[in-house]
Image (cartoon, rainbow, N blue to C red):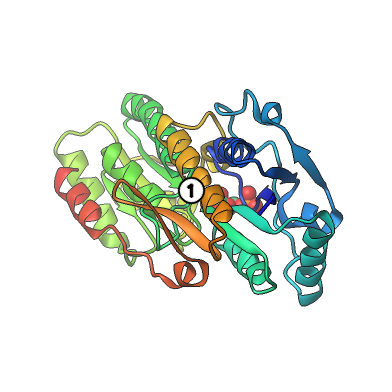
Amino acid sequence: MKKIGVLTSGGDAPGMNAAVRAAVRKGISLGMDVYGIERGYAGLLDGDIKKMEWKSVGDILQRGGTILRTARSERFNTQEGEAHAAMMLDTFGIEGLVVIGGDGSFRGGLALAEKGIQVMGVPGTIDNDLGYTDYTIGFDTAVNTVLSLVSNIRDTASAHERTTIVEVMGRHCGDIALHAGLGGGADVILVPEVPLDINLVCRKVLRGQQSGKLHSIIIKAEGVEMSANELAKIVEERTGREARAVVPAHIQRGGTPSGRDRCLASLMATKAVQLLYNDESSKGIGICGSEIVAYDLAEALQIKRDFGQDIYDLAEVLS
Ligand code: F6P
């Protein structure tokens, strides 16, 4: 294989640039031509495709976002869109594609794989919601960003003796809340994987108050049905202590990637390009323990996520 493409798709994640850099430089070092496709599948449909040089990816390792930019393309998600995208790749002579994104992006990749393109999926999403891999690129940075916010919130919440509900991202997955909750010593962690019991939440907050705690922190994943504001209202009414909602939203998606995300991205994207070079069929790249692994792309998408019940239980014991 001589020509490969790389694109970032869906929500951006810190570390995507490190993955783009690794894909481009690994490809060039193997003697391949590497093309950067802008704005994910949207740019592929529009033919926004440019040849990347070694220097095109200089000075980006430490930057959040993605230099290729990203999009969620409705146009691509149609039979005509997929056919047009495959035709575009053919026009540029691109036989293999590195798709950096989440499950929606992988499904797009699978559609192209079914049209004869070799596609390697590199999991780039802060949500950590892909079942076949222990971690996705961007998750670690997002958790650290939330932890830093929680530290700040603790200071002011203690000063005012308040309860704060921090709503974090993750779509239908509670992993950001779970890990930030354990690492940040939250009094309550609310995730979509565990049914919400508002009475229990209030009891836990009251228990903290009665034991002399100056503040309570509740970390709630966005996938939990009740909004942070609704929850704050109920908790305030039932505990008699002021409660505020904080929604950091996209703050947790930007910022310089952690060392862990940069390394993960570099290792995974390198593996993706090596597999294309070896002429392997389409794969989803992941990490299992400390090993970089590759599963058949269709199978990777079928693997169900395990909820981190052990982490959840431990956070309960320690809070
Ligand atoms: O998938 C990443 C993510 O940040 C989710 O956690 C969140 O639900 C969604 O994207 C937000 O999307 P948008 O940036 O389009 O508002």
Q: Position of residue 150 (x, y in %)?
A: 38, 33
Q: Which residue is mark 1?
A: 271
Amino acid at circle 1 = Lys
The residue nearer to you, when weighing 218 against 223, is: 223
The residue depicted at 37 percent of the width and 58 percent of the height is 191
Name the quadrant of the C terminus. top left
Is residue 35 visible in the rendered image? The answer is yes
Q: Relative to 158, does residue 41 appear above or below in the rendering?
A: below
The residue nearer to you, when weighing 177 against 200, is: 177
Name the quadrant of the N terminus. bottom right
Q: Position of residue 154 (x, y in %)?
A: 34, 29
Is residue 75 visible in the rendered image? The answer is no
The residue depicted at 69 percent of the width and 36 percent of the height is 67
Classify 10 Å Cα crowding around label 1: few (below 14), some (14-19), many (20 and above): many
Horizontal side of residue 61 vs 152, given as left or right: right
Q: Position of residue 179 (x, y in %)?
A: 33, 45
The residue depicted at 44 percent of the width and 44 percent of the height is 139
Looking at the rendering, which quadrant does residue 30 occupy? Answer: top right
Q: Position of residue 130 (x, y in %)?
A: 45, 60
The residue nearer to you, when weighing 79 against 94, is: 94
The residue depicted at 61 percent of the width and 40 percent of the height is 20
Q: Secondary structure at mark 1?
A: helix
Horizontal side of residue 281 vs 57, given as left or right: left
Looking at the rendering, which quadrant does residue 65 occupy? Answer: top right
Horizontal side of residue 319 vs 159, given as left or right: left
The residue nearer to you, when weighing 85 against 75, is: 85
Q: Relative to 196, does residue 241 appear above or below in the rendering?
A: above
